[in-house]
Amino acid sequence: MSTSTQDNASAYWSENLRIIMTYLSVWFVVSFVAGILFVDQLNAIPFFGFPLGFWIDQQGAIFVYVALIWMYVVSMNKLDEKYDVHE
Amino acid sequence: MSLDLLTYIFIGGSFALYIGIAIWARAGSTKEFYVAGGGVHPIANGMATAADWMSAASFISLAGLVSFIGRDGAAYLMGWTGGYVLLAMLLAPYLRKFGKFTVPDFVGDRYYSTTARVIAVVCTIVISFTYVAGQMRGVGIVFSRYLHVDINTGVIIGMAIVFFYAVLGGMKGITYTQVAQYCVLILAFMVPAIFMSMQITGHFLPQVGLGATLDSGLSVLATLDKLSVDLGFAEYTSGQKSTIDIFCLTAALMAGTAGLPHVIVRFFTVPRVKDARTSAGWALIFIAILYTTVPGVAGFGRVNLIETINGTDATDVGTEYAQMPQWFKNWENAGLLGWHDYNGDGKVQYSAGAAFEGGKPAYDGDVRGSHGERAVTNAKVNPTAAAGAPFANEVYVDRDIMVLANPEIAQLPNWVIALVAAGAVAAALSTAAGLLLVISTAIAHDLMKTCINPNISEKQELMYARLAAIVAICIAGYFGINPPGFVAQVVALAFGLASSSVFPVIVMGIFNKRMNKEGAIAGMIVGLGSTMAYMIYFTFMGGSKDDLFLGISTGGFGFVGMILNFIVAYVVCMMTPPPPAEIQEMVEGIRVPRGAGVAHAH
């Protein structure tokens, strides 16, 4: 591997890590902070007939997961093109 | 048409479809047998992953579980879907780039160690066997309830079908059958859910219907809260378990989901790294359709159940046994419902608290009581109302009947009931097939070919794989006919093991170039050992609940095991030499997508 491709690869990798960290923090906040740690406080807020905490717990979080994976797919496809490592 | 005939048509028709697909998609090479030739379209793979993943537990048991434990059920809803985020971002693309057949392949190569490979093989086999036992049982329940054959015959029929397409078609056959099975199971789950949502709330989507307001002016959830509290149950929308326990359980289920070998291996079947990511996205969409419907089914089912048994008249609670609808008697005959008339008024009454000594009803053969109900031998001598309940509970309702009985409780047409039966069988068979394939691959490829005798030809390897699948099916069938009395705990064990061993070892292998074999092996042993010891001590050796570590139940301990694994691996790794240069180069290679196709020329 030449130096320039190696630099390219490590720049790609660190940007990849940043993307993963961003999405996983959303994942963590929704599932664990909102869905578990502060669920009782959020339950005081009504949301289309659901207590908000309960809704996040049983439905909302799942919608967020789907969105997160697809946003990740789009980000990574762009990143692959940017660093010219796509197939 | 009668229900029996319809059920035969639906189940028979779906079986004919699966067998047809299996014949069409026979596997000719080991690559086709293990990873379907690596050329599966991401959407097809997403559907297959969804069917593979959604087992009898998701289809039959999950809604019942949520229905009876209320908000705490969210640990399962989030845990079994949130794991896909981890899978998509931390594992799937890199493992696809790595480009071999199995999880032990990765562990063995990345940690340049036969010991590590063997530990991974053992984990894979233990996890998959514990899981498959529950599936065969699910098939048996459906057959015995709807086709009036006994459970054992049901299990044997199920074994024969799986045998046919898993052994013949390998991964290729399984993948395309799973696509068909997904369609059957999702239809079977959604149709009754939509019917019930329309009946109760007038909303088409169960996801929205659960938040709707009823004629009484209360929302569905507020009605459930009120009904529950009136009968002495806990409020439906508030949690009962401690926050730390729910936190650990959710985390362990997520990491466990991402670490289950039969799910991971599905991502080896797509052509490119990009497709592995997309495929995870599709899989979660297909899974989310069912999972976001579950809370609705759970809620509507519970309201229906309580109102059918107790009636809607608050002063005259209960329904005369003779007036109970047929489903009640059917499920009583199947052994999943029980009633004893404690107050002698001839009416069935349901409230909080166990109806029978030791929980489940023990029947006195087919002896009938004075109202025609099945007599039980473990009725309580001095029944008392549970704390908060207005009267003593007279009914035992098994959680597992919720989804299967829902269409009958809601008085839906017979074809819906038949469809649900076919869906439950599809859910159980698709998961069983995926697991059996992983077991046979682990034995033929990881043990025979890689560890014991690398010189066997491809033909011989394929033969070993098929032999291993046959043995695995027989063992799974044995567990289905003679189920261990602790299926639920055993499945918790599978997730605990996956989250404390497989998940961390793969993540470290990808994200930490410095991680060496000493660290990985030490980490796996500590994670696995601590989790197994904890679960065995508290489940089978009578460990007292007061001694639980920070009050974390056995299901959640896999998360603690995972943390221990990470810590031990890191410390040991820092004290031992780094991995050889070619391993570090290999890790750099799997981090970059380009070139995944090279390993698999088409």
Image (cartoon, helix red, strand yellow):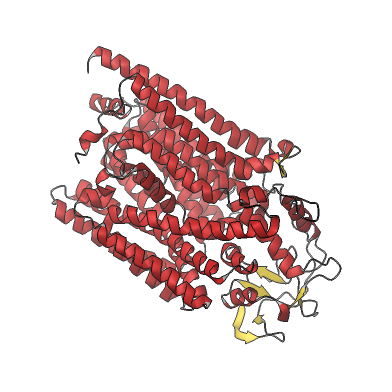
Quadrant of the image for the C terminus of chain B? top left
Residue B395 vertical position relative to residue B132 in the rendered view, above or below: below
Image coords of residue B272 (percent x, y): 30, 36
- Kindly identify the residue that appears in the image at 76 percent across and 71 percent down: B349
Image coords of residue B26 (percent x, y): 24, 58
- Kindly identify the residue that appears in the image at 47 percent across and 58 percent down: B185
How many numbered circles does the render carry?
0
- Whether residue B254 is visible here, answered yes or no, is yes
Q: Quadrant of residue B398?
A: bottom right
- Whether residue B558 is visible here, answered yes or no, is no
Horizontally, residue B262 falls left or right of residue B339, namely left
Nearer to the camera, B572 or B218: B218
Residue B512 vertical position relative to residue B324 in the rendered view, above or below: above
Image coords of residue A53 (percent x, y): 68, 40
Image coords of residue B577 (percent x, y): 31, 25
Residue at the farthest top position: A4
Horizontally, residue A35 falls left or right of residue B512, namely right
Residue B509 vertical position relative to residue B536 in the rendered view, above or below: above
Q: Quadrant of residue B406?
A: bottom right
Horizontally, residue B67 falls left or right of residue B433, namely right
Nearer to the camera, B78 or B205: B205
